[in-house]
Image: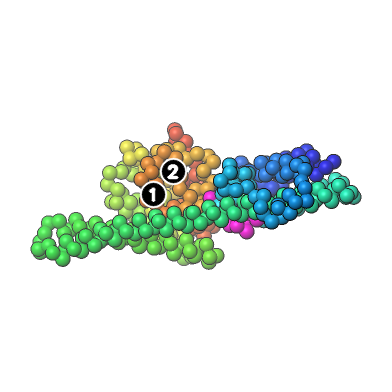
Amino acid sequence: MRLADFIAANRELLLSEWEDFASSRDGAEHMDRAALRDHAGSLLRDICADLRTPQSPAEAEEKSHGNSDSPDTAPDSAAQAHGEERAHSGFSISEMVSEFRALRASVLRHWTAHKGTLSGTDLVDLMRFNESIDQTLSESITRFTVSIDESKDLFLAILSHDLRAPLQTVLMVNEHLASAPSGDSTQAVLVSRATRSVTRMIELVDDLLDFTRSRMGAGLSVILALTDLSTVVRHAVEEVEAAHPMWAFETHIEPELQASVDAARIRQVLANLLNNAVHHGDSSLPVTVHLRGTDCDVVIEVNNFGPVIPATDIGGLFSPFKRVLTDAPPASADHHLGLGLYITDRIVAAHHGHIEVTSSKDDGTKFRVTVPR
């Protein structure tokens, strides 16, 4: 049996091993089976097609030089689509490369066990297979890198916009206060607005610092102490409620619920989830917050109604820069760095907890945070 035929006949076995390996990568923490397999089936199909295509020595040399890679102007190859999706899902480039190393090893291990002894034709197939894997990997890396660079550019553009707006507000307020007579009735309102703008800038800087620490491998630090979570959650809701007076918030908080957590970090989790609910939700319906405890864990739920998050997007919600746009107005999509949910996930992980998301038309979008007591 030629290698291309062996791959086609054992496609499900190879895909299952791909899925098992991909699930062990850090970037796969929130990915379901379909997302883990991603374009793996198409990659195997393309590799089989390449192995079955006659190739001259000149064409082999062109391939070895990378001159036969799919250009960006052509329709996406499976390899290019895979590289882009892995970048958006939060995989590192080394994690994506390791998938191809594992795929190569899986195919060759099963094929050589099946063949026993390799003939001259088998050696040709082996060489062609390695060439095809290398080309596929090259295309994936190129697209992965392009996607990351685009995300960085978008990140800087949004950051510039987000920082400029509150700075302009502070400048306007200061100019007014400098020229206004004492006792001006608008001063209190303007000072309050300036305070909110400065607070927003501090939050942006804090997000950037947390993001940098987590990406550099230091992780997010937490200082655990016995805390009244009921008070923490209630205060977090009150702060967001004050910033969004047009929204209604319903709370169902178990009283005097004690847990060993970092109070400031849990408050940050609540602020991120509540602001996310406001940004993507329907203001005509309330945002609901539940806090309850079990013998071992504490559960916090934030529920809002708005556009349903597609199931294919849920796995990437906690990746940096990942923004679920769905039916949200373009203007609103341009005003978020996309770090809030990523940082939320890292804080929960630092508490040895986990976070789940469900989204449907009837039940709305619900984020459920579970941390040990």
Q: Residue at x 89, y 49 (%)?
A: 119
Which image quadrant is residue 278 in? top left
Q: Is residue 223 visible?
A: yes
The residue shown at (79%, 40%) is 5
Q: Nearer the viewer, residue 128 or 223?
A: 128
Residue 144 image offset from top left, x and y in percent? 57, 53
Q: Is residue 39 left or right of residue 326?
A: right
Q: Is residue 233 left or right of residue 348?
A: left
Measuring 73% from the left and 44% from the top, which residue is drawn there?
Answer: 50
- The secondary structure that most of the magenta stretch takes on is helix
The segment highlighted magenta reads 88-97
The residue wearing badge 1 is 334
Q: Residues within 10 Å of mark 1 (few under 14, many from 20)?
A: some
Please tell me the numbered disc located at residue 102: none
Residue wearing tag 2 = 325
**Residue closer to the observer: 369 or 281:** 281
User: Residue flagged by tag 1: what amino acid is it?
Assistant: Asp
